[in-house]
């Protein structure tokens, strides 16, 4: 196997899986569950890094509204334990390489062979460089109004986004909050905790107290594997997929907020969308395996 920098990597006789999933969030867990229920030999590799690691309670997921993300992942793993063809490892992948017959995945010095690869590694967020903002990320500072807007009901909120999307957020939050103030992030010099919310200190030394704030972070691929495999990407930076998670490279699939189809303007960063994407990718793999027999 060659690494992404072209160097040869030594490997033993590979272990062959029908699918390897990289990423142990909702998309990856659902893909593993679907494959396990179809008795396909599957390996789930989880680095332990999650986009919503700072979130205490996730919302807008039917049957699990308000669940802690860690609890959701634990429940998913507990369910996977019932399926003997699914293996879960806490491990970080170091390299991947695809050829016409399958994909090699290097982890912990071992190279594993799989017929199909599902990338469910998610995105990482880079927040505006406002002192104090990051300390509240995932709590009183959020990105998605569907996931976190209701918790600020009847109270003022700030939208730190001067783009047209900021105006859209204001309209979306108007029925929820008592007031929605849209600010250019450059105007905010620091964010401080308040009695039951946040205090935004502005560039003219004025202050604004709000229950919470919404920002639009710059998102990037959390893992380098899309680049290593040469996958086609959208203008959004997400991997381009078809409705069943197929990427531009044969046998490689992507699911969750790291990818979206061309007819979407950007990733659907919700738990429900991630779970649906993981299931669809797994369905496509099962169909591919069935056609090969």
Image (tube, rainbow, N blue to C red):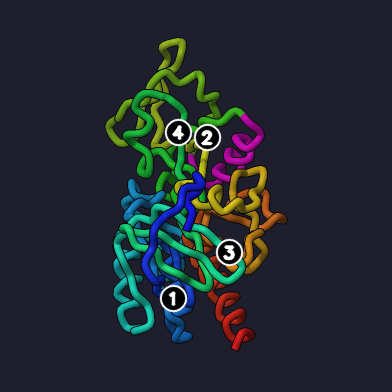
**Which residue position holds label 3?**
99
Which residues fall within the magenta stretch? 163-177
**SS class, disc 1:** strand
Considering depth in this image, is 65 or 109 the residue closer to the camera? 109
**Which residue position holds label 2?**
180
Q: Establish if 39 lies above or below 111.
A: below
Considering depth in this image, is 104 or 18 the residue closer to the camera? 104
Nearer-N-terminus badge (1/2):
1
Nearer-N-terminus badge (4/1):
1
**Which residue position holds label 1?**
16
Within 10 Å of disc 2 (Cα), the crowding (few <14, some 14-19, many 20+) is: many
Q: Is residue 176 magenta?
A: yes
Q: Establish if 20 lies above or below 260.
A: below
Within 10 Å of disc 1 (Cα), the crowding (few <14, some 14-19, many 20+) is: some
**Which residue position holds label 4?**
127
Considering depth in this image, is 274 or 47 the residue closer to the camera? 47
**SS class, disc 2:** strand
């Amino acid at each position: 196997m060659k690494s992404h920098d072209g160097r040869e990597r030594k490997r033993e006789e590979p272990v062959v899986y029908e699918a390897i999933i990289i990423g142990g969030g909702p998309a990856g867990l659902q893909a593993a569950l679907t494959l396990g229920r179809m008795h396909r030999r599957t390996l789930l590799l989880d680095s332990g890094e999650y986009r919503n690691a700072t979130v205490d309670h996730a919302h807008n997921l039917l049957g699990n509204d308000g669940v802690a993300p860690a609890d959701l992942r634990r429940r998913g793993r507990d369910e996977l334990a019932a399926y003997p063809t699914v293996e879960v490892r806490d491990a970080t992948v170091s390299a991947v390489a695809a050829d016409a017959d399958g994909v090699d995945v290097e982890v912990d010095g071992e190279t594993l062979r799989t017929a199909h690869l599902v990338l469910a590694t998610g995105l990482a967020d880079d927040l505006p460089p406002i002192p104090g903002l990051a300390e509240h990320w995932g709590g009183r500072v959020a990105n998605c109004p569907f996931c976190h807007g209701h918790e600020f009901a009847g109270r003022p909120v700030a939208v730190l986004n001067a783009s047209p999307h900021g105006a859209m957020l204001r309209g979306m939050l108007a029925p929820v909050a008592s007031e929605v103030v849209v600010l250019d992030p450059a105007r905010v010099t620091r964010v401080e905790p308040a009695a039951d919310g946040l205090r935004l200190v502005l560039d003219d030394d004025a202050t604004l107290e709000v229950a919470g704030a919404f920002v639009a972070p710059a998102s990037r691929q959390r893992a380098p594997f899309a680049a290593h495999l040469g996958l086609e990407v959208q203008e959004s930076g997400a991997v381009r997929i078809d409705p069943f998670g197929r990427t531009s490279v044969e046998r490689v699939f992507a699911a969750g907020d790291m990818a979206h189809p061309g007819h979407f303007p950007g990733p659907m960063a919700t738990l429900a969308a991630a779970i649906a994407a993981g299931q669809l990718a797994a369905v496509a793999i099962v169909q591919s395996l069935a056609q090969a027999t």
